Image (cartoon, coloured by chain):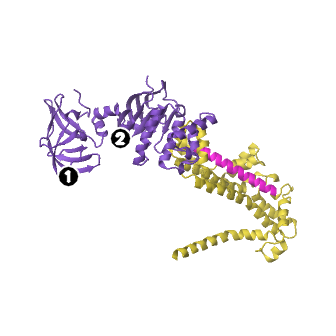
Amino acid sequence: MSFINLKNVVKVYPDGTQAILNSSLSIEKGELVVFVGPSGCGKSTLLRMIAGLEDVTEGEIDLDGNRINEIDPSERDIAMVFQNYALYPHMSVYNNIAYGLRSRGIKKLEIEAQVTNVSELLQIGDLLSKKPGQLSGGQRQRVAMGRAIARDPKVFLFDEPLSNLDAKLRVQVRLEIKKLQRKMGTTSIFVTHDQTEAMTLGDRLVVMNKGVMEQVGTPMEIYYHPKTKFVAEFIGTPSMNFITGSIKDKTFKASSFAVPAKYEDKDDVILGVRPEDISITKATTGVKCKVELIEKLGSSTVIYCVDMKENQLCVSTQSRASVEVGDTIHISTNNKALHFFDRETSKALTK
Amino acid sequence: MINRLTQMFAHFILLLGVLLMVIPIWLAFTSSTHDNVTLITEGMQWYPGPLFIENYDEVLNEKGGFSEEITATGMLINSFIMGLGIATLKVIISMMAAYSLVYFRFRLATPIFWFIFITLLVPLEVRIFPSYKIVSDIGLTNSYTGLVLPLVASATAVFFFRQFYKSVPDELLESAKLDGANSWRFFIDFLVPLSKTMIAAMFIFMFVFGYSQYLWPLLMTTDEKYWTVVMGMKLIYVELYEGVSLPRVGQRFAYIILSIIPPVLIVVLLQRWFIKGLIQTEK
């Protein structure tokens, strides 16, 4: 039996909006699962349902073997870090961390020990007497984490906790969260719209779109074997290239090129190729393209080009390609890294 | 140069305003320290006179009223109790009413709020007879409870607290819930400390409102023990005038000065707190 179980969970708001459509998921103890998806996909709603801040319209949520649908959030033993941290503005950092312990009737000495512990772990010892208004964004984030950790809850929930930090700090805190979660071994759910964050943090990802769990799996599974076009497009930067065509005689034919495809014959197929699986060939055998735009990122170069039939393509290369805007280049793909999707259902083709 | 000039002009206007407000009080104070002959023959006095202690002692301790049961000290205490009682209960009740209106999403919360709001338009004087009837039926005339209780519901304060609670971010409540706070604890541990400044402001307004009530205590109290300062203002004039050959103008001024002290005290005390709260709770 898994630690957290979502069974056919549905969320419909009173105004009729369907936020979550029939979603099931099992999370093992100690796992860090990331809900990722574009804004409005229902990832936060699902998280809030687990926290008990939103009612469950249909289905069941189990935590540690018990149904928690009807249990008050204060009784669920779940801690949450909010996007804006929701620190208590009138309390010192110490009291912010201690509040949850106090309301659970823990003895004063124990609280003191626990707060000291947590503040050492997060290196916020010298902030304990300050009020949240006097802290910087990064410090507030730490305090919010400290507040969650102090209670040693069954589950941590993170609702986009990094989105208010600057880019550099975000990477740093991301690493810290990962380390901390490993160290404490507490089951955690992390919500984000940032796919890099999702890929780096999660043991498993849940990619969501419009209230549906599109795919659940490890970051690598999702990256290399996306089950739907949405997942393929959402995960990975720059985004995957899509070219429409059809499959006939084990060959995918697009308007300007053909590649081998070991699938049954089918019209209306979408080919997906990641930019890093496309390379520039020196020979003139590949697909001929005209370079429109170049982004030099230092570690890699992203080249946007169009082929002779006006298909937009994006190529990412590690090498310092000496290509200029307006050049004509020839590209070829790694045939093992091709993804095929049904154009109607957007699902990946199966053999 | 221009900046300096405008600044000086602004200060001039402000000073004018200050003088306009302070001069009458100063005049009343200085006049309260002179004997009645001087006041009647020469008018109000600009400089303090020799009779400060005598006049104030007379006003504070002379028994007044028909049965001579009340002194100005007694009336000051009564008024203070009334003002304090009304302000405290008003703040508590309005906070709780606003809390239930904002955080417990029961049906009809909005209509109920607007209904409360409408009562703003109905002054106490309009409902004074029904109120009197009810209070006298319960037998609360001539008691502090009777003085305070009918005045403790306040649409204004409910409105202000409601607007404030609505501005408190939802995450705070959610976070507190996850931290194990029930609705009572959320109120006490979060909303009360967060609305400190609001409470101070409301308390000042409501104290002055309660303190300056005239008609209600006049109706309510037949027993002189419960007379309030504002009532006394009228009574002391009539009573003191009839007793002696000369109108005791000096004592009257002394009485007025004394009656101002409690509200001023409350404002001065709470204003400090008010400003302190304003500086500290930046969100």
Question: In this image, A117 relative to B257: left or right?
Answer: left
Q: Residue at x 61, y 74 (%)?
A: B12
Residue A336 is at least partly visible in this image? yes
Q: Are marks 1 and 2 in contact (CB under 8 Å)?
A: no
Picture colour for chain A: purple
Q: Is residue A140 above or below residue B43?
A: above
Q: Secondary structure at mark 1?
A: loop
Question: In this image, B241 relative to A334: left or right?
Answer: right
Check disc 2 and give the amino acid type.
Answer: Thr
Chain of residue at mark 1:
A
Residue underneath mark 1: A324
| Mark 1 neighbour class, 10 Å CA radius: few under 14, some 14 to 19, many 20 or more | some
x and y percentages locating residue A1 in the rendered image:
43, 22
Q: Secondary structure at mark 2?
A: helix
Magenta residue span: B73-99
Residue underneath mark 2: A196
Chain of residue at mark 2:
A
Check disc 1 and give the amino acid type.
Answer: Glu
Q: Are marks 1 and 2 on the same chain?
A: yes
Residue B151 is at least partly visible in this image? no
